Image (spheres, helix red, strand yellow):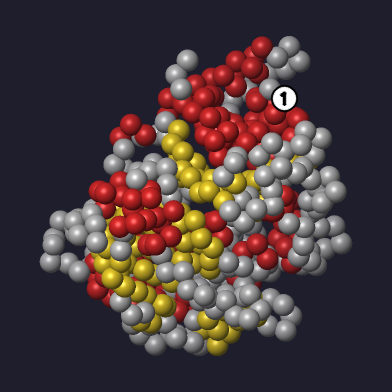
Amino acid sequence: MANHHKRTLKFDIKQIVYVKPSKPTPNGNISLSALDNRADNNGLCHIVQIYQSPKNDQNDPALMIKEALSKALFYYYPLAGRIVKHADGKLRVNCNANGVPFVEAIANCNLSSLHYLDGSNTEIAKHLVLDLPSEDEHGFQLYPLLIKVTKFLCGGFTIGLGTSHAIIDGSGKSQFLQAIAEFASGKTEPSVKPAWEREKLVGSITKMPLEIPMDESSAAVSPYLPTKKLVHACFKVDNESIKRLKMSLMKEIISDQNNNMEESFTSFESLASYVWRARTRALKLNSDGKVMLTIIVGIRKDLLDPPLPKGYYGNIAVDANIVLTAREVNERPLSHVAKIIKETKKVAQTKEYVKRMIDTSATAADDDFDYDGRGACMVLTDWKHLGFSKNMDLGWTQPVNFVPAPCGLFDKLHLCIFSSPSSLDPSMDGGARIFVSLPNAAMPKFRNEIEALITKP
């Protein structure tokens, strides 16, 4: 079916226009935080929101979104500017109100024929986002934001959003989308007023930066790498399967004679340990080599002094790194791996760790070790609570699904995303979707590992 879509799916794409703020906004250059300026944030993140046919067929979704975007940009005016790199090597935003690239497209099919993008094949999402050559000759971004609205024959439509990770993170993106939705539904101002205030997370140069406990010589290697050909896929894990996994981890802890205390695990900790092991096995990483799991942990407001304002939309997450040998990930009881993940998360949610991470980001030079090309590193981010669907009711229709588009930062081997299910699949209520990218030869083994998890005993 995927090949059928590739042969027949066509788009009538209109000319790009630049949507500017609805009213005059401040101009000039503004700085970013230490977390914003991390090298791994220098890229575009693309997501697609999927809507069924609106209740009111008189609404033109492209026109409505474009008008709402213009009003939202009055508040989020840095997104209508351009990203520049200064002599100190840091990125800044030139607030010039030049506008957001916006394009409208019309597809020659119904959204139902694409299963509302709720299938395992995620490649189709690439066609529903605006992926301009948005970098200058030095490889740095120009546009903080790109938008594409695609209308389908059924009356449904998609909103493809590309955002600079250096300017806005996942929770900030959800907040911005909520503002667009509120304007599209007729409101005159956003319920959450955005706040810049990046100076609160500038950080200080430190002599004791956090170090990654793995280097090129010790990192595990895969026989399938390096390669530029990756397969992108989505796997569904229902709520009952997650419950069974959690129970099995509990039983392992109870049966461990060296453990004298009861341990419980969250759905995230349980699924993270299982997926890390599945990926390690799928890539056939050498047993004696080191592998690293990096968990993206959100910063709570009470961990900062002074706290960040409610509408802050910059990067407010830290990395929590776990390093084991591939043999330990493969052969240790899975409950041991889950326990390490649990303990690492706790450390990352302390004031001391957050302060060190911010100072490290302000201090450390870019690491030129290609973790992505080796497969030794897996970066896990959890989107289940970001509100991409809940906060996007346009008044005349609401999203039924959202997916990452595998381009930009989301087409990387190291990245794994946990996401909430589509609202069109009630059997997945309480479950999770797993978005991964792997070499073609490694994907069958990963699929077998996930199928073993969701198969009832």
Q: Residue at x 59, y 41 (%)?
A: 441
Q: Horizontally, is 325 left or right of 337 in the view?
A: right
Image quadrant of residue 49? Answer: bottom left
Q: Position of residue 23 (x, y in %)?
A: 35, 85
Q: Say if 429 sits above or below 454 in the image.
A: below
Read off the residue under disc 1: 332
Q: Position of residue 82 (x, y in %)?
A: 53, 81
Q: Which is nearer the eye, 449 or 316?
A: 449
Q: Position of residue 95 (x, y in %)?
A: 51, 84
Q: Which residue is drawn at 65% across and 53% down?
A: 227
Q: Which is nearer the eye, 284 or 125?
A: 284
Q: Say if 230 sits above or below 87 in the image.
A: above
User: Which quadrant is home to the N terminus?
Assistant: top left
Whether residue 400 is visible to the viewer of this picture, yes or no, is no
Q: Which amino acid does label 1 sit on?
A: Arg
Q: Horizontally, is 21 left or right of 35 in the view?
A: left
Q: Position of residue 260 (x, y in %)?
A: 72, 15
Q: Horizontally, is 161 left or right of 137 in the view?
A: left
Q: Which is nearer the eye, 181 or 435?
A: 435
Whether residue 253 is visible to the viewer of this picture, yes or no, is yes
Image quadrant of residue 271? Answer: top right
Label 1: how many Cα within 10 Å (few below 14, some 14–19, many 20+): few
